[in-house]
Amino acid sequence: MDIWERISAFDADENRFERDMEKYGVPFEQGESSPRLVREHFNDACLCHCENGGASVWRQWISRACLACRTGKNTGSVFVDLRCTRNCYFCFNENQPHKDRFKIQKRDIELELKQAHRAGAHYDCLAITGGEPLLNKEQALSFLGLARRLYPDVHLRLYTNGELADKATLEELKECGLNEIRFSVKPDDVADTRNLVLANIERAVSLIDDVVIEMPVMPGTLDEMKALMMQADAMGVRGMNLLEFCFPLHNAEEFRRRGFKLRHRSRKYPHDYWYAGGIPVAGSEKEALELLRFAADEGLRLGVHYCSTDNRNTAQVHFQNKGFYTDAYLRQIYPWYDFDEDGFLKCAKAYGADAEEIRAWLDSVGHVVYGYDPDCPAIAFPRALLDDIRQALPHVVVGESAAILEEREDGSRMVRELNVRKLA
């Protein structure tokens, strides 16, 4: 086996995944409209920060909660129930566990927080979401007050579509110590609804420290989104989160009717991710980056953050791979792995004659930190050795392997390789 055979095997797996997903009724794009390298090298174009392994791009300001969300450490989100005043065709609450039960049954979020506190849980950021949390305003207010008492320094935020966020409600939220309120606004909202929500957003700016608009970037609505950004900036909104638009594996007819297709290579690395949002829509990322450029060109003061689907998966990756760094035995048997800010375990790999040559060179200079499979043959070694190997063996072809820690049915753990990509 050589590196190209290994890469081809992973490409075949990705193609099978896309064929399986197309059974839900929306086709994938043929080419790749949004190569990740464009995003990762976008910072110079708009004075942006490109972080979290290239998954998060922002300028001017980013919420403290967004930074914490990358690893999920000391963060939590709760909902009372999944009822909502709207029926958005792209809503992914249909994918939530026990969705039918929580459309009619309410959770006791105060009790859950008390139990977590008694168990020793620490929170830096807490959020109330839904459904529409203001349908359960009293429970939301009580939760916020309790959270502030139990965790005086916690960052508290609430998600809302804005329809019920009138002045009295906003004042009550302020009294409970809410730090941030996020309004969900869609480019295709009808005029009456949008005007109501924008009026409530303007009221919120004078009451809540950080007012954020969250907007799914729907391809084909660039002009509407630019106009909304200008309006938000004029109102003094603190930030706007541009969310990569996703197909939640239902309501396929609505997506087809609008001409949407799914993003080719929708995942940075193939894996069974827990995020319930679905598959990214082709063109959403491209327009999100255009909006970041627009904000820079116009000199807008508000913070703009592009949150890709990759960005929403990294907390899971950090959670799964945390065990690698707390288990001395795993680190001992896989000493060639390190990690980037995206949380994946990484190492360098070579195959065939290149693997044999690298192994011989490592042995000759006394480096024993590598893994060798004679059947392929293949070699895994720390990425820190790449420069030395390239200098000594400039003709060999080397790839980067990404992996994740998984638990077997018997409770034991294994490192599973997710992808190999040739290094330039």
Image (tube, rainbow, N blue to C red):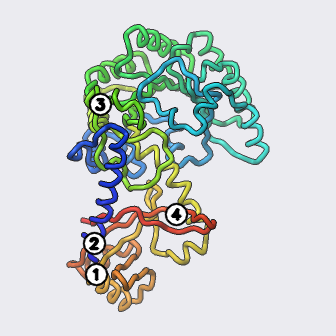
Cα separation, mark 1 vs mark 2, equals 8 Å
Q: Earlier in the sequence, mark 3 or mark 2?
A: 2
Q: Earlier in the sequence, mark 3 or mark 4?
A: 3
Cα separation, mark 4 vs mark 2, equals 23 Å
Q: Earlier in the sequence, mark 1 or mark 2?
A: 2
Residue, far front: 23
Query: Residue tagged by mark 3?
Result: 256
**Do labels 1 and 2 touch, CB within 8 Å?**
yes
Q: Is residue 148 visible?
A: no
Residue at horizontal 68%, vertical 27%?
Answer: 106
Amino acid tagged 2: Ile
Residue, far right: 118
Amino acid tagged 1: Gly
Cα separation, mark 3 vs mark 4, equals 37 Å
**Res 90 quadrant in image:** top left
Q: Is residue 281 visible?
A: yes
Query: Residue tagged by mark 4?
Result: 405
Badge 4: how crowded within 10 Å, few (<14), some, or many (20+)? many
Residue 99: image location, x then y, percent? 58, 33
Secondary element under disc 1, as helix, strand or loop, is: helix
**Do labels 4 and 1 touch, CB within 8 Å?**
no
Cα separation, mark 1 vs mark 3, equals 45 Å
Amino acid tagged 3: Arg
**Do labels 1 and 3 touch, CB within 8 Å?**
no
Query: Residue tagged by mark 1?
Result: 352
Amino acid tagged 4: Leu
Quadrant location, the C terminus: bottom left
